Image (tube, rainbow, N blue to C red):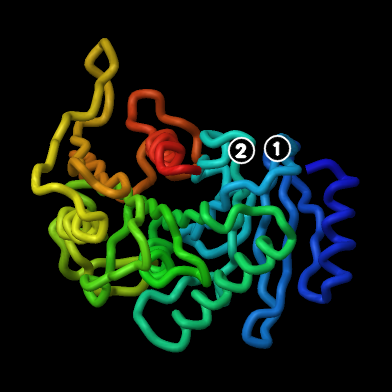
Amino acid sequence: MHLKNLFGAARAAAASGLATLLLLVSTPAEAGARLTISSDGISRAAVLVARDRLKLRRRPLIIVLQRSGGLGVRGRRHHGLEQAAGSKPIFIYPEALGGKWPIAPGPDTDREVNFLHNLTDHLIDQGRIDPRRIFVVGIGSGGPLAYRAACGGVGRPVVGLATVVSAMPQDLAACAPAAPLAYIAVNAAQDPKIPYAGGAATAGEVSFDALGAEQSLQAFAKINSCGARRDDKRLPEHKDGRGAHGAILTFANCKAPTELIRIDAASHRLPGRTPESGDGVPEDFDANRAIWDFLQRSGA
């Protein structure tokens, strides 16, 4: 975002009395603006990343709920979705109160979903995003809230949901969004914290009852009026045989794409990223690229 555009946005926000924008110290490829708004009487923060291209057109919005619930550049680099997506969408990284996203239904969860609602309204009022192209990505402990936001909407329907190394809470088994909802999840078959078959799961330091990965896929297949046939394909491997072993599970004839990527590994990390640095792992499956390709096919 150029400085003149950033300052113009800051003036507009200040004039509306709703928000302020501050430049974050980061490299140009990762430059973002710190956005603060009042939500439920509390000052709340998020990082907004909007690259220069197509800046005059309403763009897709991708809400990313990071596993730490924080705003650090390191976390954004580790997740790497911006680098995969390039300049087309606007990314917003909300900050959780206390640095942790709530897992269970209740007042804390309602407050956070309302925060996402208010953030979305603010960006729509600015004329920056297309209200028909709102997507939510939940990573790790941000996943349960991402499911809740997608099922109930954020003031407008969410049209796409992606989750990585996370799970759908069992109380959302009857999820009924207002419209078909593109869905992709990436789960490890032997994840020690998020059981692939469901049951007692751990997000951060919180335990919750989770649906199995294939149960969640089936729930969204019903939401999206998919046909009965499921198509399972092995993940592609490199020519030398390296690569993640797993499968892509999809349903046919859906009103919105519906997909699960199963990694056959005993791991609880973002596939394609090292736990410490977030650098790419060339021999591993890149979840960010798969998610972005899916979101593009879904209208992002």
- The residue lying at 34 percent from left, 67 percent from top is 177
Q: Is residue 296 above or below residue 226?
A: above
Secondary structure of the residue carrying numbered label 2: loop
| Nearest the eye: 139 or 185 | 185
Pointers 1 and 2 in contact (C-beta within 8 Å): yes
Task: Give the labeled residue for mark 1.
Answer: 54
What is the crowding at mark 1: few (fewer than 14 residues within 10 Å), some, or many (at least 20)? Answer: few
- In the image, what residue type sits under mark 1? Leu
Residue 88, label in figure: 2
In the visual, does 141 lie left or right of 232?
right
| Nearest the eye: 56 or 196 | 56
The picture places residue 168, in percent across and down from the top left corner, at 28, 65
Residue 284 placement: quadrant: top left
Quadrant location, the N terminus: top right
- The residue lying at 21 percent from left, 55 percent from top is 225
- In the image, what residue type sits under mark 2? Lys
Q: How many marks?
A: 2
The picture places residue 182, in percent across and down from the top left corner, at 35, 50
Residue farthest to the top, as pictured: 239
In the visual, does 140 lie left or right of 14?
left
Secondary structure of the residue carrying numbered label 1: loop
| Nearest the eye: 220 or 190 | 220
The picture places residue 65, in percent across and down from the top left corner, at 49, 60
- The residue lying at 37 percent from left, 67 percent from top is 178
What is the crowding at mark 2: few (fewer than 14 residues within 10 Å), some, or many (at least 20)? Answer: some
Q: Mark yes or no: residue 192 visible.
A: no
Q: CA distance from mark 1 to mark 2?
A: 7 Å
The picture places residue 207, in percent across and down from the top left corner, at 29, 74
Q: Is residue 83 above or below residue 151?
A: above
